[in-house]
Image: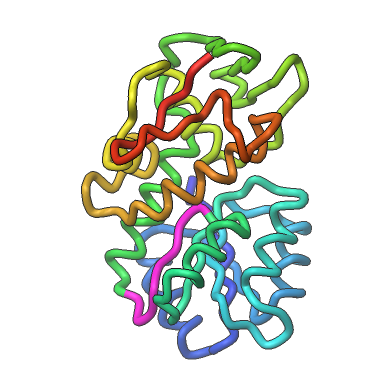
Amino acid sequence: MAHSLLLVEDDPRIRRVLRLALEAEGYDISEAANGLDALTALRRDPPDIVLLDLMLPDRDGFTVCREIRRTSAVPVIMVTARTASQDVVTGLEAGADDYVTKPLVAKELSARIRALLRRVEPNGAPLRERVVVGELEIDVPGAAAFRDGEALPLTRTEFKLLLELANMEGRVCSREHLLSKVWGYGYFGDSRIVDVHVRRLRLKIERDPAAPKHLVTARGLGYRLVS
């Protein structure tokens, strides 16, 4: 069955080009021209993935993404013409799983979408059903995580990141390793994605994110999860 994709873009010409390109790749496309329509469409018929433009007429993509994250863990790719570091980081901290910059290259965009869908879908039976690191417990087949028995509101990407760190418990995971295992980019991804998702994950798993006890930084090397 084709994956469903919600395309949020106010420019009808860009929407048409992207729709044709993505339908040719096998996706079932629905459209929204502004943030309100996007949120309505997401509630009415939740898609498998959202392609969200940053510049919308009624509200910006940051705001829309935060609204999505209040109720949904659906994967979100943010589309922006801005390449400034702070704009990219703001988009990721708003809850986006990935970002692409304009002008868009259809084949690259399709590859990003496929990589994101692969990491949020099951890929065979897990090696372990439960992983425990200190007060953290991960239900692998249920794609859920708990701290002292309380469910943590993780997005799918945050869950995959936590699971990869937990499987490497105590060992340092470089940004390149995490990009490869969680995002599937090999060495071609942007390491800012890892750093921002680690910060977001700390906010959810640490009692004091400013002084993390579990998800710690190995300065100059990467990150590790300890009990």
- Whether residue 62 is situated above or below residue 57 in the rendered picture: above
- 201 sits to left or right of 104: right
Is residue 183 toward the left or the right of residue 32 in the image?
left
Q: Tally the marks.
A: 0
Question: On the rendered structure, is 36 left or right of 162?
Answer: right
**Residue 174 appears at what percent x and percent y?**
30, 36
Q: In the rendered image of this protein, does residue 205 appear above or below residue 77?
A: above
Q: Viewer-proximal residue, 208 or 37?
A: 208
User: What is the span of residues highlighted in magenta in the rendered image?
Assistant: 97-104
Q: Is residue 77 above or below residue 136?
A: below
Comparing 9 with 162, the one in front is: 162
Quadrant in the picture for residue 90: bottom right
Q: Residue drawn 46% across and 85% down? A: 14
Question: Is 95 situated left or right of 109 in this image?
Answer: right
Q: What is the x, y in percent for residue 125?
A: 44, 15
Residues 31 and 23: in front is: 31
Q: Position of residue 27 (x, y in %)?
A: 46, 59
The answer to if 102 sits in the magenta stretch is yes
Residue at figure coordinates x 56%, y 76% from the top left = 54
Where residue 219 sits, quadrant-wise, is top left
Q: Is 56 included in the stretch rendered in magenta?
A: no
Percent across and percent down for residue 22 are 41, 67
Quick one: 187 or 134, which is closer to the camera?
134
Q: In the figure, 142 relative to 72: above or below? A: above
In the image, what residue occupies the spot 63% across and 69% down?
Answer: 62
